[in-house]
Image: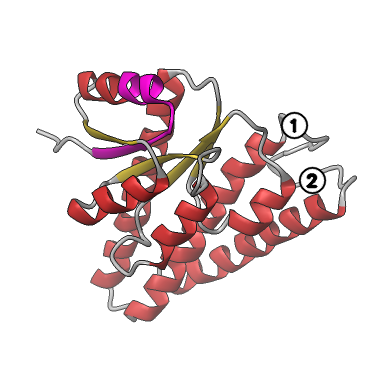
Amino acid sequence: MTKPLLILYVDDEPLLNMAFVETLKAEGHAARGALSGEECLILMGEEKPDVIILDIMMKPMSGWDTLLKIKEGENSRDIPIIMQTGKSLTLGDVLLYGDLIDDYLIKPVKLPDMLQAIERIMNRNREIEDEASRARGTGVPEERISEYVSVKRSVLVYKRLLSVLSRIYPVVHLQDTSTELDLPELKTIYDRYTKLQETCKSLHSQIQ
């Protein structure tokens, strides 16, 4: 039997928080709720969650500030984080925080979309860990494996973020990685994604 995921749901709207926590529990997860960034950090210190769903528009500590605090911690920096907000994802958000987050949901969030995001992250992590395990079995140096794991994760996260951006900005996101680069920031993001893909391909050939 699969162990239930411990999900920490962080949102300063009490009714919404309670509703999602109870619904996640009904789906078989071990969910907890936090009503602020500060409470999130406290609960996270008591028991490390498998996933954090973090609202951006909170006071006094915003979701982005909370994210940075989480990533500062040695024991918490590897926790997958799904950001959610009623605001559209901006190019500046991706440039500043794209390397730190795992997914992005725009409110109003439907439960199936949230569950899909959680499943997407878990499947991604299992896929990457399976590749890492096979590489260890063939004697590939651990530092090379760690580098590949980090880059592969970033490629999949940026692919997801570009998918979200494609609903907001004039982006044509195709398999051949072509796009209409009408905005300098968008070009920077796409160039970053393309470079990550190239690095990932190179590292993948080295761990086979």
- In the image, residue 177 lies at what x, y percent? 73, 47
Kindly identify which numbered label has been placed on residue 198: none
Are the residues at dot 1 and dot 2 in contact (C-beta closer than 8 Å)?
no
Quadrant of the image containing the N terminus: top left
Q: Residue at x 43, y 33 (%)?
A: 12
Name the residue type under label 2.
Ser
Give the structural element (helix, strand or loop) at label 1: loop
Q: Which residues are magenta?
A: 6-20
Q: In the rendered view, would you say 117 is above or below 186?
A: above
* Front position in the image: 33 or 167: 33
- Specify which label sits upstream in the sequence, 1 or 2: 1
Q: Residue at x 27, y 63 (%)?
A: 133
Residue 19 colored in magenta in the image: yes
- In the image, residue 59 lies at what x, y percent? 51, 42
Q: Residue at x 14, y 38 (%)?
A: 3
Give the structural element (helix, strand or loop) at label 2: loop
Kindly identify which numbered label has been placed on residue 178: 2
Viewer-nearest of labels 1 and 2?
1
- In the image, residue 6 lies at what x, y percent? 22, 40
Extreme residue in the front direction: 60
Q: Residues within 10 Å of mark 1 (few under 14, many from 20)?
A: few
* Front position in the image: 143 or 70: 70
Q: In the rendered view, would you say 184 is above or below 117?
A: below
Name the residue type under label 1.
Ile
Q: Which residue is mark 1?
A: 168
Residue 82 colored in magenta in the image: no
Residue 150 quadrant = bottom left
Q: Residues within 10 Å of mark 2 (few under 14, many from 20)?
A: few
